Image (tube, rainbow, N blue to C red):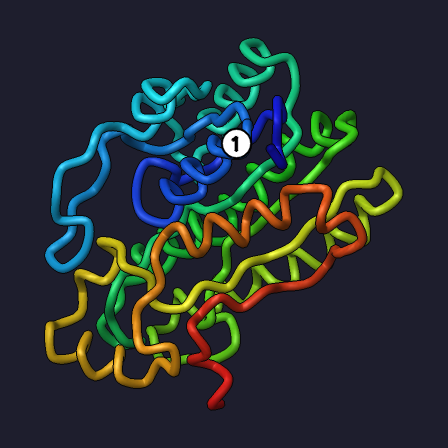
Amino acid sequence: MLLKDRVAIVTGGSSGIGRGICLEFAKEGAKVVVADVSNKPKQGKFFETTPTPPVDEEINSKGGNSSFFQTDISNDKDVKNMINSTVDLYGKIDILVNNAGIHIPGNSEELSIENWDKVVGVNLRGQFITSKYCIPHIKKSNFGRIIQIASIHSFGGGLGPAYPPSKAAVLNLVKDLSIELASHNVTVNAICPGAIETPIQDYMTEKILKEYKNTIPLGRFGLPKDIGRAAVFFASDQSDWITGTSLIVDGGHRAKV
């Protein structure tokens, strides 16, 4: 097992990509803390349409070790409580996966300032807050890892004035934290998913989904497991000498750009 007995926090872990990461970490022996606003998995119109049990319950039922802590990562108090609860329960934190993120459709005229603040508050500010309060604990670990989930939209526009800029900023946050924490043997990296089969795609139509799928060289949307395996790599000893970088996981979509 690549992550045996390591304690991992996964924000936004109840659904979608976060759920996939939690399940893959548990398979590799990690003790998984699911930090999300709700432990009820989301259901989508196109993907993940079937009800599933809370991921912590699923992991525990299979002999793993997982706990859920209700957390809004844009709320400082929530984050501190979640981190303190994790340390009280498990005694340490080895891995942080900043996965929680949101997208609210709308162009620069349609999107309200309140919703712009909300997207940036979760996608960027939330990643900073969670990292800030986890870092003192992760620095004590022999296996310190921070993994930020960004997006292929970190590299270009086209999804509104809030989501792409917030995800682009995450990549620079990764670089800064990687320099700051290198002397403590903590690595910091980003994963940039393409289109993944999760409820976040609900804003699309069937026609747009079909057209988008046809632009992906490998011919399919990604699965949460695909991102989960990339996260396992960054969290494991196999990536010891990799830090400050980002990995695109998109079925080849950006290879054409």
Residue at 47 percent across and 90 percent down: it is 256
Residue 40 on image: x %, y %: 22, 31
Query: In terms of depth relative to the viewer, which is nearer, 82 or 141?
Result: 141
Label 1 element class: strand
Residue at 31 percent across and 77 percent down: it is 219
Residue 194 on image: x %, y %: 40, 68
Q: Of all residues shown, which one is farthest toward the top?
A: 88
Residue 8 on image: x %, y %: 56, 30
Residue at 32 percent across and 30 percent down: it is 55
Say how many tags the image has: 1
Query: In terms of depth relative to the viewer, which is nearer, 115 or 69?
Result: 69
Residue at 31 percent across and 26 percent down: it is 58
Q: Of all residues shown, which one is farthest toward the right?
A: 183
Q: Is residue 92 above or below residue 211?
A: above
Q: Of all residues shown, which one is farthest toward the bottom?
A: 257
Query: In terms of depth relative to the viewer, which is nearer, 169 or 247?
Result: 247
Q: Is residue 217 above or below residue 111?
A: below
Looking at the picture, which amino acid does disc 1 mark? Ile
Q: Is residue 11 above or below residue 65?
A: below
The answer to which image quadrant residue 45 occupies is bottom left
Q: Quadrant of the N terminus?
A: top right
Residue 24 on image: x %, y %: 46, 40
Other-residue count near label 1 (Cα within 10 Å), few / some / many at <14 / 14–19 / ≥20: many
> Label 1, on which residue?
9
Query: In terms of depth relative to the viewer, which is nearer, 133 or 222?
Result: 222
Relative to 15, is 164 on the left or the right? right
